[in-house]
Image (cartoon, coloured by chain):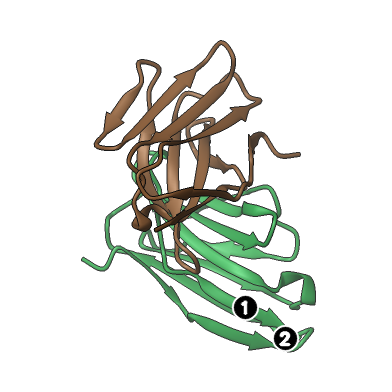
Chain colours: A brown, B green
Amino acid sequence: RKEVEQDPGPFNVPEGATVAFNCTYSNSASQSFFWYRQDCRKEPKLLMSVYSSGNEDGRFTAQLNRASQYISLLIRDSKLSDSATYLCVRDQAGTALIFGKGTTLSVSS
Amino acid sequence: NAGVTQTPKFRVLKTGQSMTLLCAQDMNHEYMYWYRQDPGMGLRLIHYSVGEGTTAKGEVPDGYNVSRLKKQNFLLGLESAAPSQTSVYFCASSSQGNEQFFGPGTRLTVL
């Protein structure tokens, strides 16, 4: 049973494109949500936290909709360096994290 | 400040052999975790610890044991390795159970 669902992709976009990833989760008790980025054969790294009010970090915008149990990540003006796998994550009882399987993005020139 | 380190980086075992993976963190984090990552399965939690001397089972604990004798170290043991345990193992730590910092991973092959 996987409690965080993501479209695995791959999403293939040209440089400069805007791309959006979606994620749904099944545990309404979760308090914290994150997007992690994982490059090929590397460890996951935190990209950004996700708040109900929405938050933006440069070209990246994350949104949380608790009523629909839905999280999104928007990447504007895609760069070649954005090519990676993006992991949607929710917390579990404040002690552990549950990771989605990831969405793969490939940005081409 | 090295963050989270893992030893070894690569290992090949024969079925039935045992080994211990070592994770160390220098950030004074209370929480530590062991995950395995397999193609198409994503990251799955094996065991975790919320403090020195405590451990708890995650999603896929069978075939693994852990120990947290020191705050900075979290050991993952395989008593009798099986081919199904071929995977990439990641260790992570966090201060309050939220943002986790990951080590570089250990690539284990069991023949």
Q: Which mark is residue A31?
A: none
Residue at 68% x, 87% y is B13
Question: Disc 1 marks which amino acid?
Answer: Leu
What's the chain of the residue with tag 1?
Answer: B
What's the chain of the residue with tag 2?
Answer: B
- Classify B30 as above or below A109: above
Task: Give coordinates of residue B94: x percent, y percent.
Answer: 38, 47
Residue at 37% x, 34% y is A49
To which residue does mark 1 refer? B108
* Quarter where residue B28 is shown: bottom left
Q: Evaluate whether label 2 is on the same chain as label 1.
A: yes
Task: Give coordinates of residue B1: x percent, y percent.
Answer: 20, 66
A9 and A91: which is toward the camera: A9
The N terminus of chain A is located in which quarter? Answer: top right
Left or right: residue B42 versus residue B53 is right
The C terminus of chain A is located in which quarter? Answer: bottom left
To which residue does mark 2 refer? B17
Whether pointer 2 and pointer 1 mark residues with C-beta atoms closer than 8 Å, the reply is no
- Classify B81 as above or below B13: above
Residue at 67% x, 34% y is A3
Determine whether the residue tagged by mark 2 lies in a helix, strand or loop. loop
* Sequence-first disc among 2 and 1: 2
Near mark 1 (Cα within 10 A), the count class, few <14, some 14-19 or many ≥20, is some
User: Which residue is outermost to the left?
Assistant: B1
Total marks drawn? 2
Residue at 52% x, 74% y is B106
Left or right: residue A44 versus residue B37 is left
Determine whether the residue tagged by mark 1 lies in a helix, strand or loop. strand
Near mark 2 (Cα within 10 A), the count class, few <14, some 14-19 or many ≥20, is few
Question: Disc 2 marks which amino acid?
Answer: Gln
Task: Give coordinates of residue A7: x percent, y percent.
Answer: 64, 40
Viewer-side label of 2, 1: 1
